């Protein structure tokens, strides 16, 4: 692996994705030491969501992308990958900011699982009400 030049972190729900980009690459994308197809398996929707920043930026053929993602579930991890890739692209080419911002790829999705409240079975669900 050649020298690492760009690093960034992206988050969604409880998932954290760290992206390292190596210049002089061939456009290879590695997620947790697997190819993107192996990592997401048959989940094409999540794979497309994770790689959405590549639809905006065409300069990816000159770099290799190494993604380390952990925490949360596969859906949150896809969002974290998308967020971190977008932030890394900004470090490479600052002129992408308005395009990425319009596509809502730079905003950290702050929605988290709501906590369970006392006296209820789940966060919002209530026990069955009985008049008598």
Image (spheres, grey):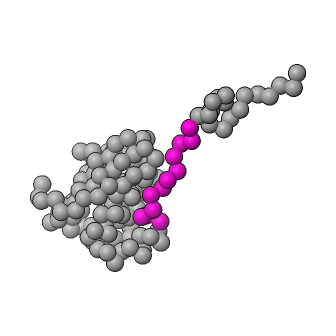
- Position above or below: 33 against 58: above
Question: Where the N terminus falls, by quadrant?
Answer: bottom left
Instruction: Please report the residue visible at 43 percent of the width from the left and 41 percent of the height from the top.
Output: 73
Res. 29 visible in picture: no
Residue 49: where, in percent of width, then height?
A: 44, 56
The residue stretch that appears in magenta: 104-115
Q: Position of residue 52 (x, y in %)?
A: 40, 62
Q: Residue at x 32, y 46 (%)?
A: 69
Residue 110 part of the magenta-drawn span: yes
Q: Is residue 14 left or right of residue 69?
A: right
Q: Is residue 7 magenta?
A: no
Please give the count of numbered marks on the rendered protein.
Answer: 0
Residue 81 at what x, y percent from top left?
A: 36, 54
Front residue of 114 and 102:
114
Residue 98 located left or right of residue 20: right
Residue positioned most to the front: 118
Give the percent coordinates (x, y) of residue 35.
28, 49
Where 38 sits versus 51, above or below?
A: above
Which of the 4 image quadrants contains residue 123? Answer: top right
């Amino acid at each position: 692996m050649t020298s690492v030049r760009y690093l960034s972190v992206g988050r969604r729900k409880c998932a954290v994705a760290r992206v390292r980009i190596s210049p002089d690459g061939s456009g290879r994308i590695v997620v947790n030491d697997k190819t993107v197809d192996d990592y997401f398996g048959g989940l094409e929707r999540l794979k497309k969501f994770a790689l959405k920043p590549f639809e905006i930026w065409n300069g990816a053929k000159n770099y290799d992308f190494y993604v380390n993602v952990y925490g949360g579930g596969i859906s949150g991890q896809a969002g974290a990958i998308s967020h971190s890739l977008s932030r890394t692209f900004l470090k490479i080419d600052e002129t992408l900011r308005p395009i990425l911002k319009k596509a809502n790829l730079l905003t950290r999705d702050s929605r988290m699982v709501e906590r369970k409240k006392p006296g209820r079975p789940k966060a919002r669900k209530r026990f069955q009400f009985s008049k008598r």
